[in-house]
Amino acid sequence: MSRLAIDARGLSKAYKIGKLRQQVLKDVAFNAYHGQVTMVMGPSGSGKSTLIAALSGLMRPDEGEVLALGENLWKKRAGKIDKFRLDHCGFIFQGFNLFPSLDATEQVVQVLKYCGVSKRESRTRARAVLETVGLGQRLHQKPAELSGGEKQRVAIARALAKAPSLIFADEPTSALDSVNGQVVISLLHQAAKERGAAIVVVTHDPRLEPHADRIIHMEDGKILNDQMISEPPSFHD
């Protein structure tokens, strides 16, 4: 049967701006399956990034619950939420979030070190995953020596290196041309199909729609429609 990776209900979140409260999530229900790329689309200010932050343990919602890999995320203490993210989640951001002084291999090694992987094993795994994303010839280049597409591939390699069950990508292609954007989404799709990860991509880039297994449209803090393009894969114990 298909396995739910995330099951969230009743998510609400408001920000205080001066004396006003702006409601950015309004009683949202959301789920995502292992082995699928779920795309959350909508205009700026629709609540997409706030939703992904609530689902991944980065921002506590005002109301609602998130069951992630069967665990009630927001019932955990802060330190346990951090540990859950470290153990199970990979993140890819629009701005790459790379360390300027580290080369491509060191960017990936840094994450594995935090996960308790030995130095030798970290370097072996880092090289392997960088080769997987097509950067086998760029292992020792620092961010300033890489193109935008290559930087994003390093960010993807860093997210994939610890084999996470959940990968969250926030506008991963907005700074890239169409060719590099296609490469990025193809790599994410591969992670879903080959590794069984649940991939949640927040984007307003319509070029990515053909690569989605499911497309969810948001506007004004609510989900307007939810289109399942391909059924989630079945997993057998």
Image (spheres, helix red, strand yellow):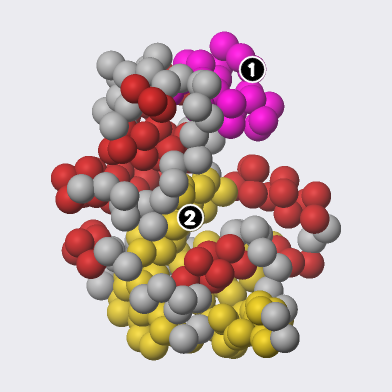
**SS assignment for the magenta stretch, majority:** helix
Is 138 left, or right, of 124 in this rendering? left
Relative to 127, say whether 62 is above or below. Answer: below
* Disc 1 versus disc 2: nearer the observer: 2
- Residue 146 is situated, as x and y percent measured from the top left of the image, at 32, 27
> Residue at position x 68%, y 27% from top?
116
What amino acid type is highlighted by mark number 1?
Ser
Q: Which residues are magenta?
A: 104-125
Visible residue check, residue 16: yes
> Residue at position x 57%, y 81% from top?
25
Residue labelled with disc 1? 118
Residue labelled with disc 2? 168
Looking at the image, which residue sits at the far front?
18
Please tell me how crowded label 1 is: few (under 14), some (14-19), or many (20+) other residues with Cα within 10 Å. few
Is 121 left, or right, of 172 in this rendering? right
Give the Cα separation between the discs numbered 1 and 2: 26 Å
The mark nearer the N terminus, 1 or 2, is 1
- Residue 92 is situated, as x and y percent measured from the top left of the image, at 46, 47
Looking at the image, which residue sits at the far left?
179
Q: Which numbered marker is on residue 88?
A: none
Looking at the image, which residue sits at the far right?
77
> Residue at position x 24%, y 61% from top?
208
